Amino acid sequence: MNIVVCISSVPDTTSKINFSENGTTFDSSGIQFIINPYDEFGLTKAMILKENSGGNVTVITVGDATVEPVMRKALAIGADQAVRINRNPKDSYSTATEIAKYLSENPADLIITGRESIDYNGGAVGGMIAEILNVPFVNACNGLEIEGTTAKLSREIDGGKENLSVSLPLVIGGQKGLVEESNLRIPNMRGIMQARTKPLQVIDPSNTDSLTTSEQFEKPAEKSVCKLVEAGNEAELVRLLQEEAKVI
Amino acid sequence: MSVLVYTENWKGSFRKSTFEAVSYAKETAKLLGMDVVALSIGDVSDDELNKLGNYGASKVLSASGIAKGDSQATSNLFAEHATNVKVIVFASTYTSKMIAPRLAAKLKAGILSNVVDIPFSTTPLTVSRKSFSGKAIEKAIVNTEKTIISLAPNAFGLIECGGDCNIEQISTSQTRSVTIEGEEIATGKISLAEAEIIVSAGRGLKGPENWGMVEELADLLGAATACSKPVSDIGWRPHGEHVGQTGKAVAPNLYVAIGISGAIQHLAGVNSSKVMVAVNSDAEAPFFKAADYGIVGDAFDVIPRLIDEIKKVKN
């Protein structure tokens, strides 16, 4: 089975976010980049599927050379090869178009994206790839088993989950539940050494137009200072929540 | 031209998020001088469909015989009814997030998600959206004729206008690409997505056996229960309760954090809450920097007293 995992390189979850050039650009100075956590659940699932029933795992991204350390990490976790489409990502549609073009030339049975990336939070690339390739798409996927050419999946719905079966090929938007946090893999020394010599193919973009433009970023207004209530005076907290905040 | 809105139902009933999406669509339609058309998928009674008029829908297209979990069929159906449409609005639900991007690619329409307010310009269409897991507000522009907007949870509110709507049954000839085997819905509990109040607890509670007071407080307030990541990782609470950057992002009117230190990843998932209360024995806990109200104290003393005080005002 051919599995392609789409990887987004994102600021580490602990990062403080800043913008430069009058708030038009994300300021990446001092930021450590990681595999988008939702993508990491998917990558780990891909490794487990490969170990259980064989196959090949490709990781793909759209980005310039600065994302290569993150792709090497994906290779160190166990992916067989990496593909980088050499373009600074602009919006969901142009990113999806680039990846879909690669996939139409290099077909996969299972395409895994994250439910969303934790930076721009568009949550659209997976669904768009599926639409361009005209294959099914299951988002917020929190369970997946492959039986021959059929996928048995579950997806999160508001207040529960829905179980589905779908024929391959298929695109999923992954999240926790696909694998558990404890299943995530820290690359070992052997993996890191091997990753250095695994193929990382750089391909030219098709430079499709973007449909949306990020114009300006601002940080949300600072919260006002926390009103502290003495322990023992819980009645005062209840009063504040009722009369001042009006939330209970 | 009109504004089209997806009005999702759960077993035949709409939820607040549905009416919120219609309210948003109506306010946007006013800016554009257009009407609101709602599209409903699945079996919904006329009585229920009529409620959409109260929030501004003038026409409701009701399609049965199609599963909302089949994103190919549903996005095709939307595309069939999007010819004369300028803006398509989706609420923040898991199903919406499956349909909206597909539809955007099909129509080559710019999509903006996590939108927090009505467009402040219509030519070009420009909105504010949450980005970087709530750590930034982004002003974004759509470069295409049609726009797809999906809302941030609980960001807009309900606007009743007391109108009526015409209901039109529509047939669909969509082929199915997905087989829905069934759904498992936790019953008798308020879902995190819909909860107006969330009571959440962390490692400060020391063990799963101590969640009784959390649940009691939640029941009293009509709240949903949630937990921090470490708590779901250890298995004290189910994964479905994990809120934070890699769990669920929530935006209730009130978020009560008990024994949660307030790691940046946790705050990223809850910072859209309207009001936050922190209870923690550590006065230096970062949550106090984000919270509106706080009590520095031992949860095992504070929470039972808080329960008593709430009982007093509820009676």
Image (cartoon, rainbow, N blue to C red):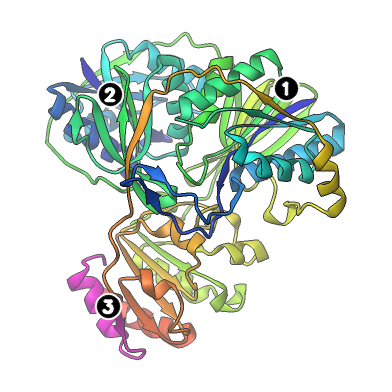
For label 1, the residue is A109
SS for callout 3:
helix
Which image quadrant: the C terminus of chain B? bottom left
Question: Can the viewer see residue B302 in this picture?
Answer: yes
Amino acid type at circle 1 is Asp
**Residue A145 in the image: x percent, y percent?**
74, 35
Q: Which mark is residue B87?
A: 2
Q: Quadrant of residue B280 in the image?
A: bottom left
Above/below status of B287 relative to A91: below
Q: Amino acid at mark 2?
A: Val
Within 10 Å of disc 3 (Cα), the crowding (few <14, some 14-19, many 20+) is: many
Residue A238 bears which disc, if any? Answer: 3
Q: Residue at x 82, y 54 (%)?
A: A188
Badge 1 element: loop
> Residue B200: where, in percent of width, then height?
46, 67
Measure the C-alpha gap from mark 2 to mark 1: 34 Å
Report the chain holding disc 3.
A
Residue B93 in the image, given as x and y percentages of width and height: 42, 39
Q: Which residues are magenta?
A: A227-248
Distance, label 3 to label 2, CA atoms, is 43 Å
